[in-house]
Amino acid sequence: MLTRRDAAAEVNDRPHNNLLRRLNRADFASIEPHLSQATAAANELLYSPGDDVDVVHFPCGPALATYLVANEDGRDVETILVGREGAVGGIVSQGFLPAYTRIVVKFAGPFVKLPINRLEVAKLASATLRNVFARYADCLLAQIFQSTACNAIHSIEQRAAKWIVSAMERTDNDATVPLTHEQLATLLGVGRSYASRVLQTLKAEGILETRRGSILVRDRTALQARACLCNEQVKGHFEEVLRGVYPTEEPGSG
């Protein structure tokens, strides 16, 4: 019989994805032989609209993926970020349906891949595995709902601060966030010049610095005070539905 310490060590030997680490021993064993890992580059395309969704991608460590919705003016608008708390592709729809959005790697890093057909076989054989993924689908939907509300009622500055804090939480709370002005503008759904003005305001107040290809947060407390509470709402829902899965102040503890 495994001790608590042995069980924790076994979980930590898994890929650094909290959703995979949330699975019980038997459920993880059922999919482990079919997992493959690769490092994905920033801006790498995982799915385009209309593509058959046949692989689930689990971001690991500091890797991030994002959903991009194309608009009639040619701009892409990012809806939500997905890091090591979850997965992209085939989670809600059970796969083999056409992708609705583009799914792109936001921050480079390791991803674990699992063929949809292997996941579906495992889910059919295990009610507990089905339950975990159904709960994650609920959390993913909550993120989408919260993002929609956030875009409607919060200021550009509040949303910019929220996105930067959210990125920090998913990159081991590193003060240096590999986020460019262009990427922040896409997250906010505004022009690059508008995003740059917001960053310059935060920079003038000593909250952050901008560097080539990244943002250095100098005062996280002040940045969090500028952010809306949407991240906290999402984290609260994760804790109710899938406790320990959303990244915390102690990365890797999930």
Image (cartoon, grey):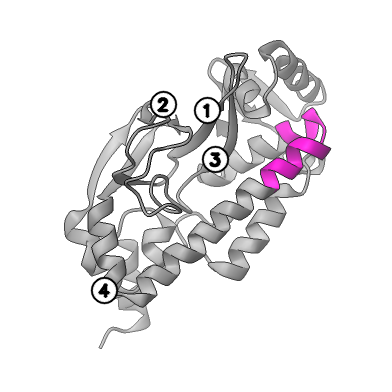
- Real-space Cα separation, disc 4 to disc 1, in angstroms: 41 Å
Quick check: marks 4 and 2 in contact, CB under 8 Å?
no
Q: Counting residues from the N terminus, which is met first, the one under dot 2 or under dot 1?
A: 2
Which residue is identified by label 4?
125
Disc 1, disc 3: CB below 8 Å? no
Sequence-first tag of 4 and 2: 2
Mark 2 neighbour density, 10 Å: few (under 14) some (14–19) many (20 or more): some
- Which disc number belongs to residue 42? 2
Please name the residue that numbered disc 1 is placed on: 178
Q: Earlier in the sequence, mark 4 or mark 1?
A: 4
> In this rendering, is residue 240 above or below 112?
below
Mark 2 touching mark 1, by CB under 8 A? yes
Q: Is residue 92 left or right of residue 207?
A: left
Residue 244 image position (x, y, % from top left): 52, 66
Q: Secondary structure at mark 2?
A: loop
Is 146 placed left or right of 54 in the picture? right
**Which amino acid is tagged 3?**
Leu
Q: Nearer the viewer, mark 3 or mark 4?
A: 4
